[in-house]
Every structure is written in structure tokens, then in C-alpha cells.
Amino acid sequence: MREKTFQGIISVIPVLIILVSIILPFNAHGWDIGATVVPANPFIQPGSNLFAGTGGTGTGAQRGPMISVQASGVTEDGSRYFLEVQLKNPLPMQVEVKEFTASAPAGGTLVNLAMVRPVTIPSGGYAVARLEGPVARGFRTGGSTPSASDLSNLKMTIVSGGIEMELDEGAIRGMLS
Amino acid sequence: MTGESGNGGGLYRLNYPGLIAGIALVILPFLGAWWTFSFGTDALVIALSPFHVRVESFGNELSSPLLASLNLALKVVMIYYGVLLIAGSVLRARESRRSLSDFLVRVSARKFLWLVILFVVSVAVTDFFISQAFIFMGVPVQVPYFVGNTQVALQMGPVSMTLPLIQGFTIIFTLAVVVAVISLLAWFYQGHVILVKTGQGTRFGRVQEGNQAVSGGEQAPVETETKGR
């Protein structure tokens, strides 16, 4: 009889441990199934907006348009036109901009530009990318720096966490305002 | 050490596969993930074992309180079974404790095999749901089951994405399968096999009714493998 009781206790202990492990977290979260089962998402906090930069409602580096032209000019040897473009990253993860091509109006013509080297933008931060394109001898810029909204034929390839994304003009235009 | 019955003493009566499996069951919960799955390099990383579930996205860990609690419980339960298996394997040396030893080994030895099978089934279910999620998004991707690399191409309006998908079992899973097999062997060994000393050295003998080994003197064991000491 004692042996049977002992065997019963031995067999029932794991069941009790499993039951307690289910009951305890539910009890700790006020029997809220969602809070107990679903992982807490560190990216989405109440009241936050991942793409705050696009609407201009973000904070710090996220405020304002995600792409803005900072400077323009012609290289010293006069063979290339360049733009310095500030790229903001409102996302909660680091992003690498691998490729960025655009056409910019300058000197009465449309200059095709490509990013010189990839840039990495930290989460919630910004980076300045330099885009360059060949121009004819004797090219004159006309003095003014084009705004981001003047750019056309936009194409960008970004990589984040090993995922590669190609954004065409439609997607990039949404970041200009 | 001298056993209560013959056949070379208590050490010969120990359930050796049970001892090995019991010790392994105590250690295994602390060794890490059995299966890993990732999107990209760190966009989404899932590392699973029955004792630990790690889900990370861009370096941020996502944790479910219920899963964490269940993992801890499974860890405790598996250590518990490991201790029972060790106790049962050692108590086999004492003939007076034989029925308790049989009970402890019976209750603990096969549980780990079920856990491994359940884990493999849950990985298959996970892969199935990942495939279904892609089909639901209109992406005709065949996600390989259990092991394999694939590239998923997604087109979402003006954005096209390429997602490398990598999954596979770890060396710890291989170890877990080996431990499950040894545990099963321990369960068989408990009722059927015993080490016996013969004129030619130490051999495996078959346990007969009344837990007496077929061995001794010049009588050859029914099932033997030469394991000279």
C-alpha cells in the first residue's frame, strides 16, 4: 500500500509542476490571455509610430522628411556633379543603404547620379550619402541646390538584418515629404 | 562492492545505460537550442528547444511569459526524470529494491523519447505555419521542412524584398536523439539484460524470471556480446 502511494506521488509530481507553470504566469498577468501568451513586442510601444519621420511627428532624428538634399556642386576637376543627401532612419533597427540612384535637375539638364559608397544609418539616426554623376565639360550648376522633391528616377536598395529591400520611386517619394 | 546476489556483485547489476541516460538528462536542459530558424541574419532568429525558446528580432528578444514558464517547468521535470533514472539504475544493484528500481526506470526512461518526438512534430508544425503564412501573403514559397536554406522574394507594392531563410537542427539535437535512444535502451536493459561474470570474462546475460541472470559457472548467457574487461 505504501509503495503504491509512493509510486503515485512520484508519477503525479511532473503533472503538478507543469500545471503550476501554466497557472503562475496567468496569475501574474491578471489572467489576461494576451499578455500571458503573446510575446511583448519591444518595437511597438503604446502611442509610438514606427514611421513617424514620414509624418513629421517623430522625435529627435525622426522629425521631418527622411530624405533631404544638404549640398550640391561640381567636383574640382569639373567632370562630375554631386549631391550630399541626408538620409534619416526612423526604424528601430540599423539600415544599410547599398545603392541609391536618382536624376537631379542641374544646369538646365537632368544629371544621373549614383551613390559613391554604401552608408549605414543607425536606428533613429541619420547619415549623409554622396551621390555623383558625370557631366559634360564646362558644366555649370546654375547656383541653386535642388530640393529632394526635384529628384526623379529614384531607386534605392537597403539592407537590414540580412533582408534586402528594393524601393522604387513610388516608395521613395513617400519619404520626401 | 558486494551485491546481495551472485553474478559478480552489485556493480554488475547496475543499469549502466540508465546511469548514462540519467546523467545526460540532468545536463541536457542546459546545453542550448536544438533547432534554429532565421530570416536574414538577425531580422528574425528563433532558437528552440523544449527547455528554452529564444525569439529575437533585430537583436531585441521577444519573450512569452507562458512559454518561459513552461520551458522552466520542462527543465525541472526532465532533471527530475534524470534523477529518477539514476536512482532506479543504482537501486537495481540491491535485489530487495528491485521492484522500486523497475518502477523508477519505467516511469522515467521513455519520457525523453516522447519529448524528442513531440519536439520534432512541433518543428514540422512551425514550418507548416510559416509556409501557410507565405501562401496567405500570396508568395508561392516552398519552405523546406526541418533543414534547409531558401530565398523568399516578396513584392509589396513599390517595395520588393529578398529574405534569406535558414533553418537547421543543432548538434545538441543530435545529442538529444542519442540520449533518447540510450534512455530507451535503459528501459529494455532494466528488464532483460544483466552483466555476468563468466570464465571468459564479463558478458551481457539475459535476466530470467525472478530476476535471476542466466549465467554463472560454465553456463553460457543466452544473449551474449563479448565485452572483456
Image: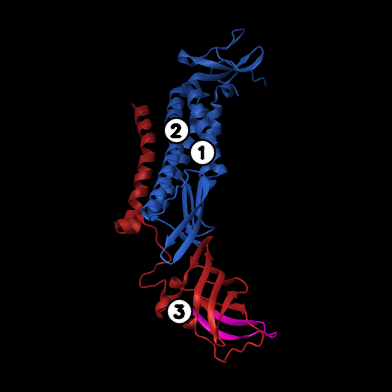
Chain colours: A red, B blue
Calculate the distance from the C-alpha at mark 1 to the C-alpha at mark 3. Answer: 58 Å
Residue at 46% across / 38% down in the picture?
Answer: B116
* Helix, strand or loop for disc 1: helix
Q: Residues within 10 Å of mark 2 (few under 14, many from 20)?
A: many
Mark 1 vs mark 3, foreground winner is: 3
Q: Which quadrant: the C terminus of chain A?
A: bottom left
User: What's under tag 2, amino acid-wise?
Assistant: Ser
**In this figure, which residue is indicated by the disc labeled 2?**
B108
- Residue corresponding to mark 3: A176
Q: Which residues are magenta?
A: A63-85
> Which residue in the rendered view is the most extreme toward the left?
A31
Q: Main secondary structure of the magenta part?
A: strand
Q: In the rendered view, would you say B70 is above or below B206? A: below
Which residue does the numbered mark 1 point to in the structure image? B25
Q: Position of residue B9 (x, y in %)?
A: 58, 20
User: Share a chain, discs 2 and 3?
Assistant: no
- Residue under mark 2: which chain is it in? B
Q: Determine if marks 2 and 1 fall on one subunit.
A: yes
Give percent across and percent down for residue A45.
Answer: 39, 69
Helix, strand or loop at label 3? It is: loop
